[in-house]
Image (cartoon, coloured by chain):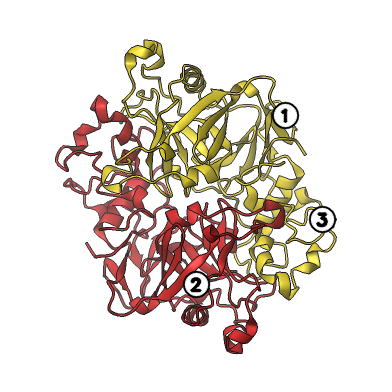
Chain colours: A red, B yellow
Amino acid sequence: MTFNHFTSSHSSSLNCGKSQHAKRFSVLRTSIKALCLLSLANFSFASEPQATPVNSQINSDAVEKTPAIASNTASWYQVPQSNTVTFKTAYGDVVIALHPTLAPKHVARFKSLIDAGFYNEQAFYRVVDGFVAQAGSNDTHDASQFPPTLLQPINAEFTQPLNSNVSVVENKDMFAPNTGFLDGFPVGIDKSRKEMWGLHCPGVVAFARNSEKDTASTEFYIVIGQAPRHLDRNMSVVGRVLQGMDVLQKLPRGNMDRGGVLDDITQESKIKQAFVHANNVTPYFLQTPLHEEYKKRANTGRNLDNPFFHDNTYGPRPIDVCYYQTKTSDKAW
Amino acid sequence: MTFNHFTSSHSSSLNCGKSQHAKRFSVLRTSIKALCLLSLANFSFASEPQATPVNSQINSDAVEKTPAIASNTASWYQVPQSNTVTFKTAYGDVVIALHPTLAPKHVARFKSLIDAGFYNEQAFYRVVDGFVAQAGSNDTHDASQFPPTLLQPINAEFTQPLNSNVSVVENKDMFAPNTGFLDGFPVGIDKSRKEMWGLHCPGVVAFARNSEKDTASTEFYIVIGQAPRHLDRNMSVVGRVLQGMDVLQKLPRGNMDRGGVLDDITQESKIKQAFVHANNVTPYFLQTPLHEEYKKRANTGRNLDNPFFHDNTYGPRPIDVCYYQTKTSDKAW
């Protein structure tokens, strides 16, 4: 089973209910017309031979390795189980991949809080449709139950030194000199500053904080709407949802007169249990932009070179990495 | 009551449960720290006096009227009831504003289909998390029950002549020379081509079609994830959701091995009833970018000029109009 519901709009296995062989032509059939309509918009003809190699069609900067740093050519990043966490809710499980390189202190705190049972029976108590689902205790926890070191403020980790595993995807982003992925996690990249940082794409997980910089402690949020990119470089990003975006979308929304905080917490908003994955359970994988499927998908996004598109006035087009995210899966393929 | 759940992430009335007077300082209080965290990210201090007028802080092109065309200075667009439609579902109502100027034939068809009862008991039969909710009959309707003119293909209406009511918000968008709003509907703008077109922002409603250009007939989709901007200028956009994005997010998701089409349609996916609003019901309003609240919000997005932000390395920043959408309401304020 492939968990592609999150990045599923970009599925290359979209066959409109027909066989792989027949799919290219089946879209014309009246009986299945409707269901194939938008499918083609993200359809990369992954099974078709391409006359022109993908790499020659994209910008030279499109999927390059950052220069002068060691190259990782893997098309999948295996998320260590120790950096995989699950939040069980009334609607199902939300599974999150953490990347300590993005915010080592915050990731360590997050896992320690989970291990200590801090989030169990706490809630997604602030949910703003199209923005974020925020979880934690809302300062209702009993501080005496936890070691003080688990609750104290953490120094901000807004940006990090540029890492050797970063792959650049785009150089025409609106909010960063470059965008791309670190091991499948969407990042902003500034080569001249030698910096990288987690991007606020849908599914990204970060620590909430007070107005001051170094004030994050236990609260976290998950982006559930159009990327709030103004938060980039201003928050400590810890990870990305692997499975369960549809679960988050079902959560009760809050009262907008209270900034999206729910008036009443019911079982539907509760975190039943949170845990870090044991080393003996099946690991998750994050696709990297070096995967052929990603390169083909991004290439189609740049050039709209399939029969569904009739207007490519502004092509070749840039890639919004928050739309063209890499896939998540429970196996490498 | 203000229906700001859709664009609610940008609420100016975010007071963290404290009084308007106290809110600026209340964010420091430990007891309400958590719930105010991200609130500030979209907080425009609307009630605070600003030393510098908003307009002087933004790009000259930021909120300008298109030149040489008559000016509309209204801060709200009242959606005619005849262009307001409701889809009743098991999870609540989805209310949509239509704008005939964007796609006159498609809007007329949509309303005729609704009036004919075409969508009643049909379903959101294809729902892809983070992408679209698609509705219609999936060619399961009985064609003999409807006039042939209601079912025949419609000529594409991908772009329209640039309209006098368009307000430009951004000139550094990734996918269009300019972006802005037509009466509160997000649009791409090309002054040199004298064209405009509906943007695929979250909440936007458009007609699905087959691979060929002029093949839309009865199916429609609503964007429920990160803006799929590659569809811009390639689809006929008819409107924008006024209320009920949270309803759409609850809909059952489809089978990704079938392109997101549901294996089984249950009552949860069904459209109980669709109707065009009568002229005697309360009208809805769409905020325009000329509204002071929008200008302040966009200005904060450009300059990050509030105490929550500590890094503005790339400021002034462009505006993603799909994030900075104008608000919807059932009254002008």
B165 is higher (above) or lower (below) than A323:
above
Q: Residue A274 location in percent, x, y?
A: 45, 72
**Residue appearing at x 54%, y 46% in the figure:** B246
Q: Report crowding for label 3: few under 14, some 14 to 19, many 20 or more residues within 10 A (C-alpha).
A: few
* Protein chain holding label 2: A
* Protein chain holding label 3: B
Is the same chain shared between marks 1 and 2? no
Q: Secondary structure at mark 2?
A: loop
The residue carrying mark 1 is B71
What's the CA distance linking mark 1 and mark 3?
A: 25 Å
Q: Report crowding for label 2: few under 14, some 14 to 19, many 20 or more residues within 10 A (C-alpha).
A: few
The image quarter containing residue A182 is bottom left
The residue carrying mark 3 is B52
Q: Residue A261 location in percent, x, y?
A: 65, 59
Of badges 1 and 2, nearer the viewer stands 1
The residue carrying mark 2 is A192
Which quadrant of the figure contains the N terminus of chain B?
Answer: top right
Q: Is residue B120 left or right of residue A297?
A: right
Q: Is residue A179 left or right of residue A132?
A: left
Is the same chain shared between marks 2 and 3? no
Q: Residue B316 location in percent, x, y?
A: 65, 58
Q: Secondary structure at mark 3?
A: loop
Extreme-left residue of the structure: A21
**Residue appearing at x 49%, y 53% in the figure:** A249
